[in-house]
Amino acid sequence: MKQSWRQFGLFVVLGLILSGLISCGSGPPNAHNSSAAEGRQEVEFWTMQLQPKFTDYFNHLIANFEAENPDIKVRWVDIPWADMQSKILTAVSAGTAPDVVNLNPDFAAQLASKNVWLALDENMPKEIKHQYLPKIWQASRLNGASFGIPWYLTTRITLYNQALLEQASLSEPPKTYEELAQVAKQVKESTGKYAFFVTFVPEDTADVLQSFIQMGSALVDEQGRAAFNTPAGKAVFQYWTDLYQQELLPRETLTQGHRRAIELYQAGATAILTSGAEFLSTIAANAPDIAKVTASAPQISGKTGKKNVAVMNLVIPKSTDNPNAALKFALFVTNDTNQLAFAKAANVLPSTVNALKDSYFINLPTEASPMDVARFVSASQMEDAEVLIPAMNNIKELQQIIYDNLQAAMLGQKTVDQAVADAADEWNREVEDRR
């Protein structure tokens, strides 16, 4: 599970071109009719790299579902993380798609634009969606239609080295990007170290892209054209350019990814790590001395106060032979009881309103462990949390264009105004070329 979440940031922003992959790989054989002789409908359920750690959980979950629904048999197939995209694309193209698939909204939205998924608004009672966090439900909507059911969530928090901040005469971590710039200067002047590391590698996490939304700049307008060539967008370009040119960011931010952020923090070379609560156990294993002085705080945001959340959802292919059974199973997996059980087992957050109100998330034990505190901080952010990057095609190309031009400004190859204008023009040409 740890390795999966390390890869999650990469997967959540990965925008692949459908035509380039539709013929790649080979999906598992369609076995929908294997239970026909028994007179039972079969639901084939694909997850991403949840075996063997959660094998017992899912076997128990499926057994309970089948006991309540004796006319339905569930066949669980776990797909390696790196293989899921090519396999689901191939299965959809070949007409052998499973009945329920575990994806994230970003990639699922790319296929939603191809009309691949079952239209949920037409196939489920309207009141059901109100069981889920409203902003999270919105993450699985495209062009006004719902294509996915929210499942489990993770949200980034601020892990910080209390000892290093104290050396810089700081008692708490920054809450906003404005404060982060001040802290970066103070840490560098007092300790010679960096406050934090953030990557500008387009193929890696989208933290910088999300910062546009948090600082009040849209990325695209309703027509899909660039919406960041504005004073707000220029301010974001200027913010990151200033930090880099003032030598308040490590030079390798331009060439290395989030893994480097973890390495630097564990080495005591940075004061702040923006990451998921699940990385506390990794830090404890790899750098116990750093873990002892690590505390948790809410995610750093901009003037909007928005917090980012990563969502995993369940989608149902439109081609399923058993839409009612598939929907019944997907809703069973994501109901309050089962979401709470999985959240506890996997150290993630549930996406239903009632499950998130459980005392496990809102009450701290008297002798709270660092993980207890991190879980509490993560859960407390859910009211403001949302998927900040809009569901859209070619989001990866937009990230590449913005990061390339932002790097040019940081390196002094372009002025900020020119970098913003060039990025907007390049993106708008791409939009026009696709029409």
Image (cartoon, helix red, strand yellow):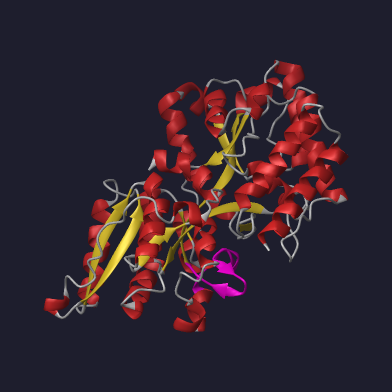
Residue 419, image x and y in percent? 81, 39
The x, y position of residue 365, in whole percent, is: 46, 48
Examine the image and state in which quarter residue 254 appears. top right
Taking the magenta stretch, the answer to whether it contains residue 233 is: no
Question: The C terminus lies in which quarter of the figure?
Answer: bottom right
Hey, which residue is sitting farthest top in the picture? Answer: 192
Is residue 113 placed above or below 209 in the rendered structure?
Answer: below
What residue sits 24% from the left and 60% below the top?
29
Q: Nearer the viewer, residue 291 or 349?
A: 349
Q: Which of 290 and 87 is in front in this view?
A: 87
What residue is shown at x 37% (from left), y 69% (from top)? 330
Q: Return the x and y of residue 222 as percentages of the image width and height.
A: 74, 66
Which segment is the magenta one?
A: 131-148
The answer to whether residue 223 is seen in the rendering is: yes
Viewer-nearest residue: 118 or 52: 118
Q: Which residue lies furthest to the left in this view?
A: 37
User: Residue 239 lies in what quarter of the image?
Assistant: top right
Name the quadrant containing residue 186. top right
Residue 369 visible in the shown view: no
**Residue lying at 52% horizontally and 67% vertically, measured from the top left:** 112
- Report the label total: 0
The N terminus lies in which quarter of the figure? top left
Q: Identify the residue at horizontal 35%, vertical 76% (top origin).
A: 328
Query: On screen, 338 above or below 271?
Result: below
The spot of residue 161 in percent (x, y) is: 59, 28
